[in-house]
Amino acid sequence: MRPSMLRMLLILLSATALPTTVRAEDDAEALARLKAEITQVVGDGRCGNVSFCRILPMGYDACGNPSAWIAYNNAPDIKEILETKASEVTFVEEDRMRGKPKPADCKPVRAPKLACINGRCVLGDLSY
């Protein structure tokens, strides 16, 4: 076999020999890393009242809705960092859903309410 043909054969074999689970593991690792970075940026989310708090959608579920919401303190420069990281999470999750059919019972999701409870920005509905 000629060296050029051998090289071509090796290239073709290496391109087709990669299992598809490698990509899924890479996506899972990327999501875990991004979510850890988001948690670190949000920190303790301190607030004096709810006016200090903001909410950000993140991710992409089977219906095309955000898969999570982030409550954070609107301190300088945090918003831009979180928006970038949330966009990366959304991109990875949307890419993982691409080509899969949407469930028949999809409904739009409403953003949760923000609150400042015990000096921290949190998500949830208050019933009082």
Image (cartoon, helix red, strand yellow):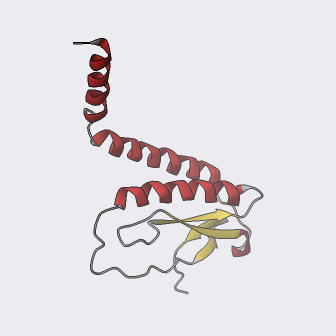
Viewer-proximal residue, 5 or 118? 5
Q: Seen in the image, is 5 located left or right of residue 50?
A: left
Residue 1 at x, y = what percent?
21, 12
Report whether residue 83 is seen. Answer: yes
Residue 115 at x, y = what percent?
62, 74
Furthest residue to the bottom? Answer: 128
In the displayed structure, 9 sits above or below 119; it is above
In the displayed structure, 49 sits above or below 33; it is below
In the displayed structure, 12 sits above or below 40; it is above
Report whether residue 43 is seen. Answer: no
Q: Residue at x 75, y 55 (%)?
A: 77
Residue 64 at x, y = what percent?
41, 71
Viewer-proximal residue, 47 or 53? 53
Q: State the quadrant of the C terminus.
A: bottom right
Furthest residue to the right? Answer: 76
Q: Seen in the image, is 79 located left or right of residue 18?
A: right
Q: Quadrant of residue 15?
A: top left
Q: Residue at x 42, y 42 (%)?
A: 29
Number of marks in the image?
A: 0
Residue 26 at x, y = what percent?
39, 41
Q: Seen in the image, is 108 located left or right of residue 118?
A: left
Q: Seen in the image, is 88 located left or right of residue 119?
A: left
Q: Residue at x 49, y 44 (%)?
A: 33
